[in-house]
Image (tube, rainbow, N blue to C red):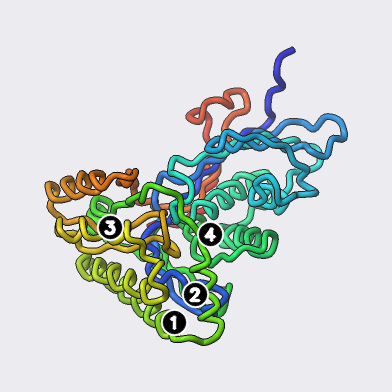
Amino acid sequence: MAAPRPIRVIHARAPIRINDIGAWTDTWFAGRGKVLNVAVLPGVEAQIAAFPRRGRDGARVTVHVENYEETFRMDPGRPATEPHGLLQFAVGSLPPGPELALDIRLHSSVPAGISTGTSAAVCVALLGGLNVLRPRPLAWAELARLAHRVETDKLGQQSGIQDQIAAAHGGISYIEMARYPEARVSAVRVGPEIRSELDRRLCLVYMGAPHRSTDMHERVIAELEAGGPQLNVLRRLTEVAAAARRALAWGDLEAYGEAMIRNNECQRALYAGLISAEADAAADVARRHGASGWKVNGAGGRGGSLAILAPGDDGLRRRMIAALAALGRGIRVLPTSLASRGVQAWESSAKDWRSRLSNLTKLDLGGPL
């Protein structure tokens, strides 16, 4: 018996974010803050095949998590925390109509747990694909807010707002949060030459292991809640984010790199363990090869990743990349490119549903760089 053909096939993709200057200030415990981050590809891809629903089975959504080689079925009306609660509650937030059954595939080309907002990008890409099935699609800002609520309200996780905004908005985002979780988002526009230089020089360094969230993060949060001296560090982080934005607006990449280093030291001041020995070793390689800046991505800690603004000289940049790999332990530079747009979703012909190149009608939900 031939497999049924889908009646609609939707594809979506969302970028990840790196070099989040001002991170930690986009959280509930900061209350207000500023973050400048950069969206890059490769990010996360989602494919949703919609079929006519047969029978009354509630578990009418099948999800394939390709990076983990896992498949599960779920009822969109009754999402659960296991397995993959993030995915279940995302589907439950924008459920398909009762007449449809879905087959969903998710894939990311970057390793899991690299502190680049990948889980937020997964949620935004999935919501972006489900959004196409709606009679009236949501705008990118609404998708970002919905993805944030999935992590915080539905799953009870700690989450700032910047990751979801970067995945939905794309480009270089300047996020001003006057009161958590409300924010004003501005696209930082740079000239084509600066954009090309940033694309060439901004490196994502995988530290060889997934980010390990330990009790150090809870300690930082506890200190901040108690009104400890770290509150002054959060204020400095907002100043660094503003300085980084000015540097990019002026086309001054050296000043932008200096802001990265200042941010990294602010993270260390929040809690020394947020900058691991491996990150310091990678930063030392960058320094010795003339890099303009370096910064641990995300909250910091063991594993994860580092952003480096490589030297302008091509030879030095290539030697730096080789020296980073020579550190061993799986440390290496991952290829990336600036993502000028945020989440995108489009529908391909159901007759040629295995081809992502034919009969594409794009629904662009992002903004320009």
**Closer to the observer: label 1 or label 3?**
1
Helix or strand or loop: what does disc 4 sit on?
helix
Q: Which residue is drawn at 42% across and 56% down?
A: 17
For the residues labelled 1 and 2, say whether their Cβ atoms are less than 8 Å apart: yes
Point out the tag, 4 or 3, that comes first from the N-terminus: 4
Mark 1 belongs to which amino acid? Gln
The foreground one among 224 and 191 is 224
**Residue 277 placed where, x, y %?**
32, 60
Point out the tag, 1 or 2, that comes first from the N-terminus: 2
Q: How crowded is mark 3: few (under 14 residues within 10 Å), some or many (20 or more)?
A: many
The foreground one among 329 and 245 is 329
Q: Which residue is drawn at 34% across and 46% down?
A: 336
For the residues labelled 4 and 3, say whether their Cβ atoms are less than 8 Å apart: no
**Residue 11 placed where, x, y %?**
56, 38
In the rendered structure, the answer to whether residue 358 lies left or right of residue 282 reads: right
Q: Residue 230 carries which label?
A: 1
Mark 2 belongs to which amino acid? Val
Helix or strand or loop: what does disc 2 sit on?
helix
Q: Residue at x 49, y 51 (%)?
A: 118
**Closer to the observer: label 1 or label 4?**
1
Q: In the image as oriented, which residue stretches furthest toward the top? A: 1
**Residue 16 placed where, x, y %?**
45, 52
Q: Residue 220 carries which label?
A: 2
Q: Residue at x 36, y 72 (%)?
A: 268
Mark 3 belongs to which amino acid? Ile
Point out the tag, 2 or 3, that comes first from the N-terminus: 2
**Closer to the observer: label 4 or label 3?**
3
Quadrant containing the N terminus in the rendered view: top right
CA distance separating discs 1 and 4: 25 Å
